[in-house]
Amino acid sequence: MPTRRRLANAIRALSMDAVQAANSGHPGMPMGMADAATALFSDHLKFDPADPYWPDRDRFVLSAGHGSMLIYSLLYLTGYEQPTIEDIKNFRSLQSPCAGHPENFMLPGVETTTGPLGQGLATAVGMAIAERHLNAHYGSDLVNHHTYVIAGDGCLMEGINHEAVGLAGHLGLGRLIVLWDDNQITIDGPTDLSRTEDVMARHKAMGWQVLECDGMRPQSVSDAIEEAKGSHKPSLIRCKTIIGYGAPTKQGTAATHGAPLGEEEIAAAREALGWDAPPFEIPEEELQAWRAMGEKGAAARKAWHERVEASPKGRELLNRLSGALDHDWLEPLVEKLISDAPKVATRKASEIALDAINAVNPSTIGGSADLTGSNNTKAGGIQPLDANNYGGRYIYYGIREFGMASAMNGMALHGGVLPYGGTFLVFSDYSRGAIRLGALQGAKAIHVMTHDSIGLGEDGPTHQPIEHLQSLRAMPGLTVYRPCDAVETAECWADAMKQSGPSLIALSRQGLPAMRTEKAEGNLSAKGAYRLKAAGAERRVILIATGSEVHVAMEVAEKLEAEGIGADVISMVSTDKFDAQSAAYRGDILPDVSNKEILRVSIEAGTTFGWERYTGIHGMNFGIDRFGASAPAPDLFEKFGLTSEAITPKILERLNND
Amino acid sequence: MPTRRRLANAIRALSMDAVQAANSGHPGMPMGMADAATALFSDHLKFDPADPYWPDRDRFVLSAGHGSMLIYSLLYLTGYEQPTIEDIKNFRSLQSPCAGHPENFMLPGVETTTGPLGQGLATAVGMAIAERHLNAHYGSDLVNHHTYVIAGDGCLMEGINHEAVGLAGHLGLGRLIVLWDDNQITIDGPTDLSRTEDVMARHKAMGWQVLECDGMRPQSVSDAIEEAKGSHKPSLIRCKTIIGYGAPTKQGTAATHGAPLGEEEIAAAREALGWDAPPFEIPEEELQAWRAMGEKGAAARKAWHERVEASPKGRELLNRLSGALDHDWLEPLVEKLISDAPKVATRKASEIALDAINAVNPSTIGGSADLTGSNNTKAGGIQPLDANNYGGRYIYYGIREFGMASAMNGMALHGGVLPYGGTFLVFSDYSRGAIRLGALQGAKAIHVMTHDSIGLGEDGPTHQPIEHLQSLRAMPGLTVYRPCDAVETAECWADAMKQSGPSLIALSRQGLPAMRTEKAEGNLSAKGAYRLKAAGAERRVILIATGSEVHVAMEVAEKLEAEGIGADVISMVSTDKFDAQSAAYRGDILPDVSNKEILRVSIEAGTTFGWERYTGIHGMNFGIDRFGASAPAPDLFEKFGLTSEAITPKILERLNND
């Protein structure tokens, strides 16, 4: 039986060889943490390469994602179907699933896409929350796993670390275990170039258990993990390591961090490590030992399946893990809203929708970054999820927008829960990194973003989104909705719940009149845009508006019709969804712009940037291309010319001049 | 002489009355921190209401910006010209400079715009850095002031707090003193709903001095500040306070945080506080005491001016504080670059420009969020600024993008320095909140954002910007540049240095051929867009490209011309700058799109979203509307169809079909 150090050297060899072959990458971290990872995989991690998605597996998150060769090596060595050795030889090329940073959508076995520092750990917090929550509902027989993280100094220096560590400490996530690769090196050089901090004391202050080990000795690491597993607090294990361990002249320096070691250094490293196998070849004995480690997990998985089968709650759990949701709440709610026609803020409408959703969907977990009463996110009688009640369904995230969004990603990736969380739209700037990483991974979380324009009024320009809607619409993989009334809000929630990835619903602070007062066929908002009102007189204008400006567009249309000018009103609930409709549908809603007989006009209380896509250059764009101001909302709409009184004459003038 | 408690009650009365009159706002914080603020202003703060911008004043930052009535009260009471009592009566309305959150561009005396939590403190870190830096160069006779911050629990929970506290601790900014309003309340309720943290221990672990005081007793606060001033570490003073102090039934609860107290509660508070003056009236005795406090500062200011006059370095300091910069480096550099025509990455070109800039502009302070070698930001032989050498000009910010950008805002607002700092463009998602707050304030900082597209290659989609350029261009007040070669890069730097607000320069990782090989009149990039190549044959196509795609456009043009089709190539260095040009200039570069004889084509390795503004709907947009991939850059340009071989036939096909 080879020593664990020998097994770890297999990781070192694959890592330095793959980076060399790709002529780019990060060998230092995998070589430094190879022993620690070997200890984790050999002695603790519950996993089964034959079924990477087995629900009760432990989660392993490589937060320091640049060290991707560590996880690729581990997956290959333990016998996952992917990556193959060919994949590793083609590290960082188009034909390989071994991307520069680990992508969960390319490789089963990668639990979450990492790379943007700090987010892996913050995502792991969400996974650990989901585990405790499901455990509370289904018991330890069915849900009982750990979440392990390897994090570097970058992950610990990023601001999001404070939010993630704070949240984990507050929730007492004892099953979260972080191995800190304490190699004293960052890209720019020694950590003391930029950091003077007692990392352990900080974590202790945040409610964590802190442990130390020799990261270069597998037994030392394994013992520390064993101790961590016994704690009711999340654990930080400081692994003292040497970056690039094995590379004789470069180890311990930033030179090993992000560049190939070079042929000569690699040869010398082989010698130093006593590793004489050629590149990409793992000696039979070591490979067998690794594979045997991988095969150990099958028994636990099989036993779990038997327990699920035997449990009265087993089927329900599997159903939840499949992501099944109840959508039947929509129709009766819409019917009621159409008949009641309430004049409410769409954030309030969102609460009404959530009352209905949460009542019939036990898998939702709501929350807010300390704006519960403003985001209207606590609905349907759900109770707090906290260290004393993991079964609760509402998280007081605190003033941690980024941490919240990352935790939501983690919960979504864990499965079995549908997370949603609220903040003000302008603070999407704080959580944007996580919204994007969720979009890249198709992590199904719903971002509830209220106070979505100058309509929030007195809080002023720091709180008023201007460029946010458009800049979020420009993000791939994210579906952005901006409903105009209570009916559309319910429809947006229903559609968001059907997406395979994340959504963002932008909601007003201010009350809005009911626009949808007649029964319609199906979910109109799901089409992205639809004709709310057809021109009465001959159509000369198409008004395209969203959210709180739809009723303004309706008023403008009324005024135009009074002048004998026909005007359609299009409610553009989601440009993402509209762009995905058939050409025929899009052409019906927005006929070819070369038809200059018809003037297209956009109205949205945000930047006009990008609206030319729908209006053409010769259309008109009403919006706000500067920062807002502090005043009551009606004064602001007047100041920025976003009233029917201001807009209508400008359209008339244009029509008269054309 | 009224007691300080009496003086503090003047703040309480103004705050509750103004919020009530506005029918919105946050009375709780000003009422809780009134005693502490009174202690700070009466015993410590060096300020002169007669000259709010006096350079050696202490800086006071209300990081908990929602408590804006605290600072408005202080400015009014101590005798600043603004706000007047009328302004306070009109709190949160269009006619008043007393906005919902404090705006430095509306009120002298407000050092920085605050509201987005955590950023005020992080900005103050930059101010404190600038102070120490200038002190190192000009001595304590000329530069010698403190930076005081009032921060709430939100400011301390936000992720940026970790970065700001870490940076301040590392740099040993002993003149930074933070008063923590420890009122145990956040919007959602008691802090223990979301936080389990020993705040003091955390700060201690980060290298801070931590002190405690009774925040409701001015002398206790004043003593703590006195102690803090003696430390070589930044200080956190925990002020135990009662939110909404004075409101008999609501104090100590979240009910006082963000809503008017109501007439009845205000009447009861008046009674409880022994304050019988009517709303917005300050009894003569109290007003006189406050005004006397304001008048004390004139002597220090006068003495400083005398010292400046007498000092051999005084004139130089004043010149620096005026923001004067040397721009003469540009012309010879451009001349050399035109003659050398180097094929370099624009990040390298940026280093070349910085070599020239830093050599003649002593006020630049560079840095990077741990990507110094990748961002090419350490140039011109500048030395590190650290706790042992505040006179240095390069900051190793560590892995703290958001903290870096906020610190840059603070340095810019302090004056006397021009900060620039680097990270990867994709990580603008991390620092976006600070970029925006800088844009709102016109804080002149230059964001150096390298690795600006899929051209970064193997690091893959987590690191490849797609929507970033457009989403940053959509932000008001920020000038975004994307140069195509070394000459344009120098021009962008020169133009950025002439802006009154922040700029962002997007730079390539990969080498780019020289495009500008002929001498031109003036700074062409400063126009935002210009004709790099005029059509040879009759013009039928206008190719609009930016940065690393300009040379692709040139190749496309060459291929089109070979087919007898004339094509202009427009280098769109900055849409922000181009949009601000005269209609005549814009019309020359991009003739009216209704001229369908001319096809407009955009090429940019990012989202196509928004490019219709320049191409019209019937133009063509080449870009990437999905996430990137991990592979060598040339493979990616091929995969995403951003080569002249892929683009040219599509243009020809369109021309043939039209």
Image (spheres, coloured by chain):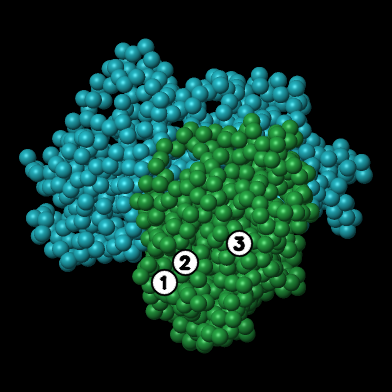
Chain colours: A green, B cyan
The answer, for residue A273, to whether it is visible in the render is yes
Q: Which residue is mark 3?
A: A111
- The x, y position of residue A551, in whole percent, is 51, 71
Secondary structure beneath label 3: loop
Q: Are marks 2 and 1 in contact (CB under 8 Å)?
A: yes
The residue carrying pointer 1 sits among few (fewer than 14), some (14 to 19) or many (20 or more) residues within 10 Å by Cα, namely: many
Chain under disc 2: A
Q: CA distance from mark 2 to mark 1?
A: 8 Å
Q: Which residue is mark 1?
A: A390
Q: Quadrant of the N terminus of chain B?
A: top left
Q: Are marks 1 and 3 in contact (CB under 8 Å)?
A: no
Secondary structure beneath label 1: loop
Quadrant of the rendered image containing residue B352: top right
- The x, y position of residue A61, in whole percent, is 57, 57
**First along the sequence among labels 1 and 3:** 3
Q: Residue at x 48, y 33 (%)?
A: A193
In the rendered structure, find residue A129 and report the number of the disc placed on it.
2
Q: Is A263 situated left or right of B498 in this image?
A: right
Check chain identity for marks 2 and 3: say if they share one: yes
Q: Residue at x 46, y 82 (%)?
A: A359
Identify residue type, mark 1.
Tyr
Observer-nearest residue: B574 or A234? A234
The answer, for residue A435, to whether it is visible in the render is no
Q: Is B631 situated left or right of B293 in this image?
A: right
Identify residue type, mark 3.
Glu
Observer-nearest residue: B427 or A50? A50
- The x, y position of residue A135, in whole percent, is 47, 74
